[in-house]
Amino acid sequence: MNDRQITLVQESFARVAPIAPAAAGIFYARLFEIAPEVRPMFKGDMTAQGKKLMTMLGIVVNGLRDLDLIVPAAQKLARGHLAYGVRAEHYAPVGQALIETLEQGRGDAFTPQTREAWQAAYAVLSGVMIEAAYGTQEAAE
């Protein structure tokens, strides 16, 4: 990711953060629509889950300029997700749901450049997480 992409991700997230509960609701609704097989992995309070999601996104987005600080936490999170049955192929629909949620939340302000920046950020993060949980072969795919 380049500096401009990081700025686009951070600025767009800052505009979505005030509507975090609604954004989380949109995200999970879309995720369960495109990947219904993951729905059983979510057994708890979805409002609390949405708060966790938005908090983690905020930490990651704010740490994009210093990946050494956020990578260990992302790796730990990925390994923890194994206990819920998360597989490497689940990361793609999560990324799709995230991008679509941001696009819906930002409307016309979610430019093609912003989309590209988020895709780059998600590729970095999901690659790190997949490698931590499943090894380098899965991350390469």
Image (spheres, helix red, strand yellow):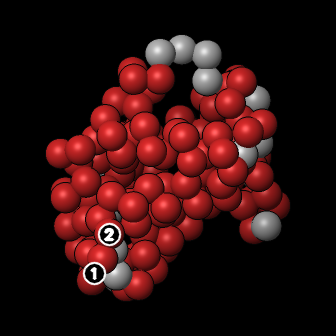
Q: Which of the 4 quarters of the picture holds residue 82?
A: top right
The one nearer the camera, 51 or 100, is 100
Report the quarter where the C terminus lies. Answer: bottom right
Q: Secondary structure at mark 2?
A: helix
Which residue carries the number 2 mark? 107
Which residue carries the number 1 mark? 3
- Give the left or right position of residue 32, taking residue 1 as reference: right
Q: CA distance from mark 1 to mark 2?
A: 23 Å
**The furthest residue to the top:** 44
Mark positioned earlier in the residue sequence (1 or 2): 1
Q: Secondary structure at mark 1?
A: helix
The residue carrying pointer 2 sits among few (fewer than 14), some (14 to 19) or many (20 or more) residues within 10 Å by Cα, namely few
Decide: is 72 above or below 76: below
- Give the left or right position of residue 60, taking residue 36 as reference: left
The one nearer the camera, 53 or 107, is 107
The one nearer the camera, 136 or 5, is 5
Question: In this view of the protein, can residue 59 be seen by the observer?
Answer: no
